[in-house]
Image: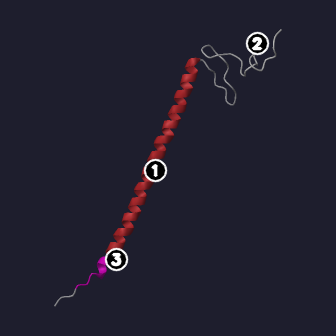
Amino acid sequence: MYQDDYGWMAGFGVGVLIFGIILYLAILALVLWIGYLIMRTAVKNGILLADEARAARGIPQRPGGQYPQHPGYPSGPSAPGAGPAGGPSAPPTR
C-alpha cells in the first residue's frame, strides 16, 4: 500500500517557527527604534520651541542660573515676611 512519512515536514515546521520568532523580534525592535527616534525628535523640538519662546519674551539664556524678574511676572518677596509689607512672621509694629 502506501506509507505516510512526514518526518521531513517536522523539520520544515521547526524552521518556519524559528524564522517567525526572528521576524517577530526584528519587527518589535524596529517599532521600538522608530518610537525612540520620534520621541527624541519631539523632545528636541520642544526644547527649541521653549528657547524661542523665552527669547521672544526677552529672557536671556543663563545656564545654571535663575532668570531675572521682568515685566509681567510678580516681583514680590520670595518668602512670607521677607518684604517690607511684613507678614505672619514679621515683628509687630508699634
Packing grade of label 3 (10 A; few <14, some 14-19, many >=20) is: few
Residue 14 sits in quarter = bottom left
Mark nearer the viewer, 1 or 2: 2
Left/right placement of residue 42 relative to residue 2 reads: right
Q: Is residue 71 left or right of residue 18?
A: right
Q: Residue at x 43, y 52 (%)?
A: 30
* Lower sequence index among marks 1 and 2: 1
Residue 22, position in %: x, y? 41, 63
Q: Amino acid at mark 2?
A: Pro
Residue at the right extreme of this rendering:
94
Rendered image: mark on residue 32: 1
Q: Is residue 89 above or below residue 12?
A: above
In the image, what residue occupies the spot 81% across and 11% down? 93
Mark 3, residue position: 11
Q: Earlier in the sequence, mark 3 or mark 1?
A: 3
Residue 24 lies, with reference to residue 4, above or below; the image says above
In the displayed orientation, state which residue is furthest to the top: 94
Of all residues, the one furthest to the left in this rendering is 1
The answer to whether 15 appears left or right of 49 in the picture is left
Q: Amino acid at mark 1?
A: Leu
Give the magenta-colored segment's residue range: 4-10
Q: Quadrant of the N terminus?
A: bottom left
- State the image coordinates of residue 28 (x, y, percent, origin top left): 42, 55
Badge 2 is on which residue?
A: 84
Q: Secondary structure at mark 3?
A: helix
- Residue 44's mark? none
Front residue of 46/88: it is 88
User: Given the image, on which type of amino acid does mark 3 rest?
Assistant: Gly
Q: CA distance from mark 3 to mark 1?
A: 32 Å
